[in-house]
Image (spheres, grey):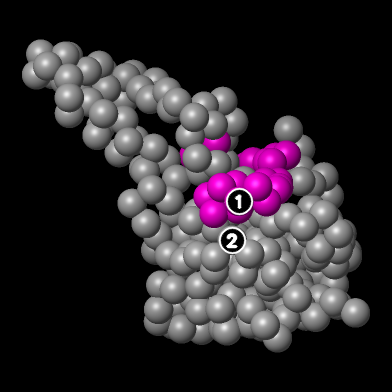
Amino acid sequence: MIRWKSFSFHMPNAAPEIVLLQKKVFDSLDEPLEQIQDSCSHGEFLTQTLRENAHNLDVVVFFDLDCIPLKTGVVQRAIRAAMDHEMIIGCAYQANHIEEQKMFDKRRNWPIVLRKLDSLRICFCKLAGIDPFHFKNPLIIAGPCFLVVPTEIYRFVGSPTLVVTSRADAAGELTIACRERGVKVICLQPTYCHVPKYKLGNQRRLGLGTIFGRCIFHAFETTYLHNSQSASLFQRYCKDVISGTQQRPSR
C-alpha cells in the first residue's frame, strides 16, 4: 500500500470561502486533503513539507488553495503513475518574469544604441498590444498548483529546495534537479483557459480558470485583492463538482 498525503497551503489572509469550498470539493470526491495555514512563503512550505515527510511517506501531493481535481480518482491515478514510472507530475508552468529577466541580462552586453532601439521596440509593442518577447528554450516546470512527488525520487535528486530562486519560481528547482538526474517530469498541459494571461512556451497561454489535462482546474490569482473574476470561476467549478453537474466549458 502506498503511503501518501495531499497538502494545500494558504496564508492567514486567504478568503475563508475559498478555503471552505476547496475542502468541500475534496470531501465530495472522497479525496483526503490537509489544508495548512502558515505565514511562511509558498516555497518554504513546499520544501519543509517534503523534507519532513521524505521518509514516512511514499508520495507527497500538493495543491494550491484555488486548485481542485475535477473527477474522482484523479489524485490516486496520478500517484500510481508517478510511482510506477518513477517520475514527478505537475501542471505545466512558466515564470515569464524570470524568462524576461534572462533576456534583459543578455541585452546588457549589447551596444547602447541597440539597447535603446530595443527599448523603443518593446514600448511600441506594448502600446500596440503585441507580445514583445520571444523566449529561447524557456524553462517549463511541473508547477506546484498540483504536484505529485514520490519521496524516493526527491531524495534521489538531492532533496532540493522548492523556494523561488534567481532561475526558477516555486518548485522549479525540483524540475531542474530531476532533469539533471534523468528523472522524467510530466507537465500536464492546459486544455482550456477562460482568461488567457500568461505565456507557456511562446504559443500557448495560461490564465484565470485554466483546466490542465482535462482533470485539474486552477483558478489563479484568487489571493489577489478584488479579483472577483478568478474567485467567481473557482466558486462555479467547485459548486459544479460538488453537485455533480459539471459541464464541459464552451469555447
Taking 146 as reference, is 96 above or below it?
above
**Is residue 183 a member of the stretch shown in magenta?**
yes
Kind of residue at disc 1:
Arg
Q: Position of residue 211 (x, y in %)?
A: 70, 48
Q: Residue furthest left?
A: 112
In the displayed structure image, the side of residue 213 where residue 138 appears, left or right = left
Looking at the rendered structure, the secondary structure element under dot 2 is loop
Identify the residue position indicated by label 2 in the image.
157
- The residues tagged by marks 1 and 2 sit, at their Cα atoms, a distance apart of 6 Å
| Horizontal relation, residue 44 to residue 249: left or right | left
Say few, some or many: other residues with alpha carbon within 10 Å of mark 2 (under 14 / 14 to 19 / 20 or more). some
Given the image, on which type of amino acid does mark 2 rest? Val
Question: Visible in this render: residue 111?
Answer: yes
Q: Nearer the viewer, residue 204 or 94?
A: 94
Locate residue 160, reporting x and y percent.
Answer: 50, 65
Looking at the image, residue 9 sits to the left or right of residue 29; the answer is left
Pick the quarter of the image with the C terminus.
Answer: top right
Residues at badges 1 and 2 in contact (C-beta under 8 Å)? yes
Q: Position of residue 198 (x, y in %)?
A: 49, 39
Spot occupied by residue 2 in the image (x, y as percentages of width and height):
85, 77
Q: Earlier in the sequence, mark 1 or mark 2?
A: 2
| Bounds of the magenta segment | 176-200
What residue does disc 1 label? 181
Residue 221, magenta (yes or no): no
Q: Is residue 212 left or right of residue 17?
A: right
